Image (tube, coloured by chain):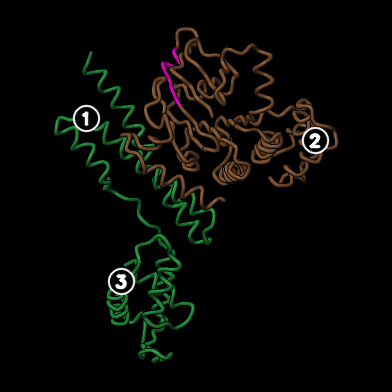
Chain colours: A brown, B green
Amino acid sequence: MLEARTLRKSFGRTTALDGASVEIGEGEVVAVTGPSGSGKSTLLHCLAGIIRPEAGEVLFAGRRLDTLDEDARTRLRRENFGVVFQFGELVPELTAEENVVLPLLFGGRGRRESLEAARSWLERLDVADCAGQRPAELSGGQLQRVAVARALAAEPRVIFADEPTGALDSLAGERVMGELVGAARESRATLVVVTHDNRVAAYADREIALRDGRVVAGATAATGGTADGTPGEAAAGASAAGGVSR
Amino acid sequence: MSTGHVLLGLLSERPKHGYELKKEHDQRLPGAKPLAYGQVYATLQRLERGGLTEVAGTAQEGGPERTVHAITEAGRAELDRWLAEIEAPAPYVASPLFARVVVATLAGGTAEEYLLRQRAAHLTRMRELTARKASGSPAQVLAADYALQHLDADLRWIETALERHTVLKGETDA
């Protein structure tokens, strides 16, 4: 469903990705982990079509993503991808509800339908009470739940989350991860979470471990989670995790 | 004598027999190693000798006759004293993980490969615990939290060790 082939990307003299390759299947929940500077955010940005690699290929549903022009990539992102950032990145001038509605309107949905979808997602994430409030009036946990509602309301096929609990305390983070993973599994969306927190990574079926811009473990579902490439172990953990949340 | 204090705590609710104590211990401390019957009876004997519990009669519910134990005044005082204490932070590094890394370097090999395999095993266990939390009782969630945070601490130590290893290697190469 989502694939990167030997991606290379540098920022100035810093090499962020140095031949990174991954395959992510439909409906999989994967965690991209690694120390600071290992290239995990850059990999996410390349997979999500936000930035273009200097070399290598990015494929979504068998289609090259990195060769599309800016407009085509934006359209593809809007129709298929949802993104959750570390600090929510909500529009500060809009209410929580408007923040969720806006991308739906951009995506061509009707006003009434968009409003209904937004309300039901805010309800589901237990932030319906905050619908009329602006981001500055919300707690960190509420902000992230609104951001999750916004990402999921458009029913994306892939959800990208970059350190979605990075700014939250332990219990607020647990709640956001529970909702994010639960909603992704329910709607059979693929979820790619970048994190440096092992407890967040433990929600995923598989860990894609990065080091110095390369994938050192979990590049494909068969090798997922085991650093020595022994198949099976991680897959067993994955089905156990999936079984409970369904 | 931590098992003794847990039994005293269970008896502080009402008198109970040994089989009941074993069952309740395992239920209320999920994730802890289940108590062996022999240990329950040995501990009860010790508590009784110390005057912290006493025999309060027998019970028979269809099965064999069972001795019912009750907490004494001295037992309650001991329980209060124990609850007012803190557990001393561990004075030694007793982790087998640590020993393996040091021994691996002593043996002239590299600990890196071991650390990566250990990391994968820890993370697999964390996935199981995280999944279990979704449908667990409050005590099971607390037990899973405890286990998860300790595994996480190990993992962070493993990551630091891997980083230091790279640094050390870099120094010897240069």
Which callout, 3 or 2, points to the residue nearer the camera? 2
Q: Quadrant of the C terminus of chain B?
A: top left
User: Which residue is rendered at x = 38% and y = 34% of the image?
Assistant: A223
Q: Eyeballing the image, is B19 above or below B87? A: below
Q: Which amino acid does label 2 sit on?
A: Ser
Q: Where is residue A111 in the image (x, y as percent from the top left)?
A: 85, 33
Q: Dot 1 falls on which chain?
A: B
Q: Chain letter of disc 2?
A: A
- Front one among B80 and A150: A150
Report crowding for label 1: few under 14, some 14 to 19, many 20 or more residues within 10 A (C-alpha).
some
Kind of element beneath mark 2: helix
Which residue position is annotated with label 3?
A: B36
Quadrant in the picture for residue A140: top right
* Quarter assignment of residue A15: top left
Report if the CB atoms under discs 2 and 1 are less than 8 Å apart.
no
- Residue A198 is left or right of residue A107, and the answer is left
- Residue A114's disc is 2
Q: What element carries label 1?
A: loop
Q: Residue at x 39, y 77 (%)?
A: B75
Look at the image and give the residue range highlighted in magenta: A15-22
Disc 2 crowd rating (10 Å Cα; few below 14, some 14-19, many 20+) is many
Q: Which residue lies furthest to the left in this view?
A: B107
The disc labelled 1 sits on which kind of residue? Thr
Pointer 1: what residue?
B110
Residue reaching furthest to the right: A112
